[in-house]
Image (cartoon, rainbow, N blue to C red):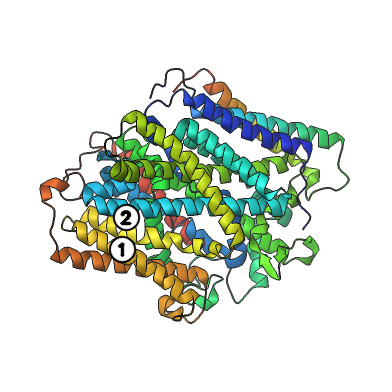
């Protein structure tokens, strides 16, 4: 297999976790300022914010570490 | 039930995931130039890549929904599927069996049968595996569409075709490599998408001890929160099974049959870059396998604890008077996840489903191309032709899966038969493999007729009980009825029959010369692997750590 220039799998894992985590975090900010009429259980804990934030840290870290690496 | 509502942000997340996996397939196509690239990902993967793919190939969405639902139904005994029903077999594969698989440079499990025994045993297993894979793939497709329809209100046909076309797209483009890439992405999305359910469940109820205490208070007679302490009397545990059935049926035959011989998972280890990485593949996966109950079992226990508290408002769905146990996880997602997180949770389920589908299809195209097409139909096929055949068989495999899915839709009872298929194919095959790999005097005819007898007896036992030709208690040796216990015991008897017939026929038929079996049979092969590396870097060291954690978990939850 010719692998010259091929990005490692961890680059893609970091990218998708970063992107989805970013969207979850943004939805958390929106819900913080615009709480829905029907709330989920424990909505007052704002899980989107801290879980999305955790995903951004994990995904972003992996993406930055791997962005210049090849297999 | 009112379907779980998806907001705009949830749809965006789901769309991004679909576009992402197709993009990966396109990106990897330029690196897929030979048949070895397509079928074995070029044999260049590290332990981590092969190990996580090895685990994820087994981690489908149905497994997540089904095992959470089963925990609601049977209690903590379901954790046996993740611990005794997986860990010893995975370690055995890495330590004892992988050197023979990997060093013989085979492309598939039937390929080993050809080298160790003969062509007819290979073709028999190749055909059985191909049919099993397509059936499992199609029924999974049907069941997943059913889940999406029930819980999300999606159109049955659209969701099935969209998923099938996406899988066909990226597997056709770059074969096992893209399947492995998406399996690893799925692994992370499942943890990020579903572990939060357990975390929020614990926060709502108070603690893990409180969850257990509530369940024990509600059900003091039958234990739902222990692993072994009530296994001597089937009446005292939720699964109605004796420890003998767990150890022999699940822990030995079903587990070893699946984890050491099912090409769907073992193919990932074959893609490793060297023998040490291949041996480490199932050993590394064993650590993550042991952690999965903290998603599925814990979520199932949370669902029990909530459902017995009338104030919680949590109640499983009912279909036609029957409890729909598979609704436990989607209902927990609906309970805890606001918009955005719902998209993540649904994407995790979709990713699990599509990666499982890709695993089945990539295993099917390899076995079809090498063990049926090249072995029987076109023995002189060139490398380029086999690569082409791999791509064609991927598309044909997906189409046949769709046909099976529509068949299942018309005849829902075949869903029941699928539960038993692993015990029909894998349980006897494990006897053939074990005997063939460790006893040099097992003959090709012994292996072939043992495999035939084992498969037929397992099928016969299933239908005999189903159509009341004889009582289930003859198989389970217990007066209480449980489908799960019957599965465990039937697998054990199929294994025993296969092993007995294999040995008896081998005693009276022509043996292969020992010199032809070097590299294929333990005892005839000098095993020199990993001698020059320190003990703390050897697969055996990590296997011991895994075994210690496995023992501690069983004692902890005894």
Determine the secondary structure under disc 2: helix
Number of marks present in the image shown: 2
Residue B464 in sight here: yes
Residue B339 position, x and y percent, is 77, 41
The reply to whether dot 1 and dot 2 touch (C-beta < 8 Å) is yes
Q: Is residue B450 left or right of residue B458?
A: left
Percent from the top left, x then y, of residue B310?
A: 78, 66
From this view, report whether residue B200 is shown above or below residue B389.
below
Q: Is residue B147 left or right of residue B440?
A: right
Question: Camera-side residue: B159 or A41?
Answer: B159
Where's residue B17, x and y in %? 63, 34
- Whether labels 1 and 2 share one chain: yes
Local crowd size for mark 2, using a 10 Å CA cut-off: few (<14), some (14–19), many (≥20): some
Q: Chain of mark 1?
A: B
> In terms of image quadrants, where is residue B65?
bottom right
Badge 2 sits on which subunit? B
The residue singled out by tag 2 in the image is B124
Query: In the image as oriented, which residue stretches furthest toward the right?
Result: A37
Percent of width and height locating residue B59: 52, 48
Tell me which numbered mark, 1 or 2, is placed earlier along the sequence: 2
Which residue is drawn at the image coordinates 44% and 54% (left, top)? Answer: B132
State the separation of the CA atoms marked 1 and 2. 9 Å
Q: Is residue B279 left or right of residue B234?
A: left
Which element carries disc 1, helix, strand or loop? helix
Decide: is A36 above or below A15.
Answer: below
Q: Which residue is mark 1?
A: B452
Who's the residue at 24% across and 58% down the image? B435
């Amino acid at each position: 297999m010719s692998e010259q220039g091929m990005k490692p799998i961890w680059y893609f894992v970091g990218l998708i976790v970063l992107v989805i985590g970013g969207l979850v975090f943004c939805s958390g900010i929106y819900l913080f300022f615009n709480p829905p009429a029907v709330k989920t259980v424990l909505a007052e804990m704002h899980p989107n914010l801290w879980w999305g934030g955790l995903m951004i840290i994990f995904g972003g870290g992996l993406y930055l570490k791997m962005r210049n690496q090849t297999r | 039930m009112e379907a779980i509502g998806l907001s705009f942000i949830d749809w965006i997340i789901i769309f991004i995931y679909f576009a992402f996996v197709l993009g990966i397939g396109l990106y990897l196509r330029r690196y897929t130039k030979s048949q070895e690239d397509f079928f074995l990902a070029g044999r260049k993967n590290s332990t981590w890549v092969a190990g996580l793919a090895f685990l994820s190939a087994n981690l489908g969405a149905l497994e997540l929904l089904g095992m959470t639902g089963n925990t609601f139904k049977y209690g903590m005994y379901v954790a046996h599927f993740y611990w005794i029903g997986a860990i010893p077999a995975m370690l055995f594969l890495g330590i004892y069996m992988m050197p023979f698989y990997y060093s013989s440079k085979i492309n598939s499990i039937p390929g080993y049968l050809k080298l160790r025994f003969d062509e007819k045993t290979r073709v028999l297993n190749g055909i059985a595996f191909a049919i099993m894979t397509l059936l499992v793939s199609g029924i999974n497709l049907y069941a997943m569409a059913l889940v999406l329809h029930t819980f999300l209100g999606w159109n049955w046909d659209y969701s099935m075709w969209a998923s099938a076309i996406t899988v066909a797209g990226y597997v056709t483009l770059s074969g096992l490599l893209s399947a492995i890439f998406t399996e690893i992405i799925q692994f992370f999305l499942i943890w990020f998408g579903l572990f939060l359910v357990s975390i929020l469940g614990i926060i709502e109820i108070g603690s893990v001890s409180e969850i257990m205490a509530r369940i024990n208070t509600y059900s003091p007679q039958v234990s739902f929160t222990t692993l072994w302490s009530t296994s001597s009397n089937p009446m005292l545990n939720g699964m109605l099974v004796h420890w003998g059935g767990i150890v022999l049926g699940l822990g030995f035959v079903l587990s070893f049959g699946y984890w050491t011989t099912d090409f769907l998972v073992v193919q990932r280890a074959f893609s490793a870059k060297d023998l040490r990485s291949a041996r480490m593949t199932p050993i590394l996966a064993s650590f993550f396998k042991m952690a999965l109950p903290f998603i599925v079992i814990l979520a199932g226990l949370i669902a029990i604890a909530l459902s017995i508290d009338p104030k919680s408002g949590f109640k499983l769905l009912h279909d036609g008077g029957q409890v729909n146990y598979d609704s436990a996880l989607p209902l927990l997602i609906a309970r805890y996840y606001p918009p955005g997180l719902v998209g993540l949770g649904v994407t995790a389920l979709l990713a699990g489903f599509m990666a499982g589908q890709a695993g089945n299809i990539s295993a099917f195209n390899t076995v079809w191309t090498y063990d049926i097409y090249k072995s029987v139909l076109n023995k002189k096929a060139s490398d380029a032709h086999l690569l082409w055949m791999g791509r064609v068989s991927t598309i044909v495999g997906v189409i046949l899966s769709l046909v099976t899915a529509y068949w299942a839709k018309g005849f829902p009872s075949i869903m029941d038969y699928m539960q038993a298929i692993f015990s029909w194919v894998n349980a006897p095959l494990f006897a053939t493999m074990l005997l063939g790999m460790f006893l040099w005097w097992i003959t090709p005819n012994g292996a072939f007729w043992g495999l035939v007898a084992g498969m037929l007896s397992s099928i016969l036992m299933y239908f005999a009980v189903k159509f009341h030709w004889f009582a289930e208690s003859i198989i389970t040796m217990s007066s209480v009825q449980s489908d799960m216990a019957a599965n465990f015991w039937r697998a054990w008897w199929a294994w025993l029959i296969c092993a007995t017939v294999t040995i008896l026929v081998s005693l009276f038929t022509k043996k292969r010369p020992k010199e032809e079996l070097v590299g294929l049979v333990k005892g005839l092969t000098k095993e020199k692997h990993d001698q020059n590396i320190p003990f703390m870097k050897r697969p055996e060291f990590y296997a011991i750590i895994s075994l210690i954690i496995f023992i501690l978990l069983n004692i902890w939850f005894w």
